[in-house]
Amino acid sequence: MNTKLHQLPYETSDLALVAFLSLLFPIESIDKSNPRKAIFLFTQTQELDKQVRSYWRGETRVEPRAYFDELRRIKSRIYADR
């Protein structure tokens, strides 16, 4: 079940976490107001929360090539409009 937990989005600037999460969930937006740090926003759901906890516990597994490609795609989105 993918029910919303809060009205506020889940925010992170951790690129490794963003790459993992974006393999499973769409990035809703990127806040680039700080030129030194991009903040990625995801819709907060119970499933997203579960995946974040699993990531920090080291319990996640992804296909390496897909992860690397996603990380490159994210970096290109960060620098696209600067």
Image (tube, rainbow, N blue to C red):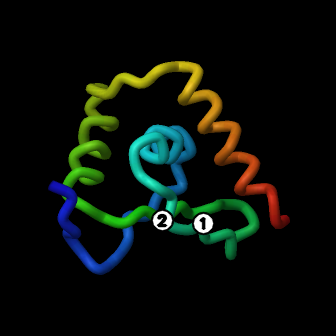
Task: From the viewer's side, name the closer residue of 1 and 8.
Answer: 1
The residues tagged by marks 1 and 2 sit, at their Cα atoms, a distance apart of: 6 Å
Q: Name the residue located 15 percent from the left edge and 55 percent from the top edge.
A: 1
Q: Is residue 73 left or right of residue 2?
A: right
Task: From the viewer's side, name the closer residue of 35 and 20.
Answer: 20
Q: Name the residue located 61 percent from the left edge and 71 percent from the top edge.
A: 31
Q: Name the residue located 46 percent from the left edge and 40 percent from the top edge.
A: 23
Rendered-image quadrant of the C terminus: bottom right
Report which residue position mark 2 lands on.
Answer: 41
Against 42, is 69 above or below? above
Disc 2 secondary structure class: strand
Report which residue position mark 1 lands on.
Answer: 30
Query: Dividing the picture into quarters, in which one does residue 45 lie?
Result: bottom left
Query: Dividing the picture into quarters, in which one does residue 44 lie?
Result: bottom left
Query: Dividing the picture into quarters, in which one does residue 37 lie?
Result: bottom right
Q: Name the residue located 54 percent from the left edge and 29 percent from the top edge.
A: 67
Against 60, is 46 above or below? below
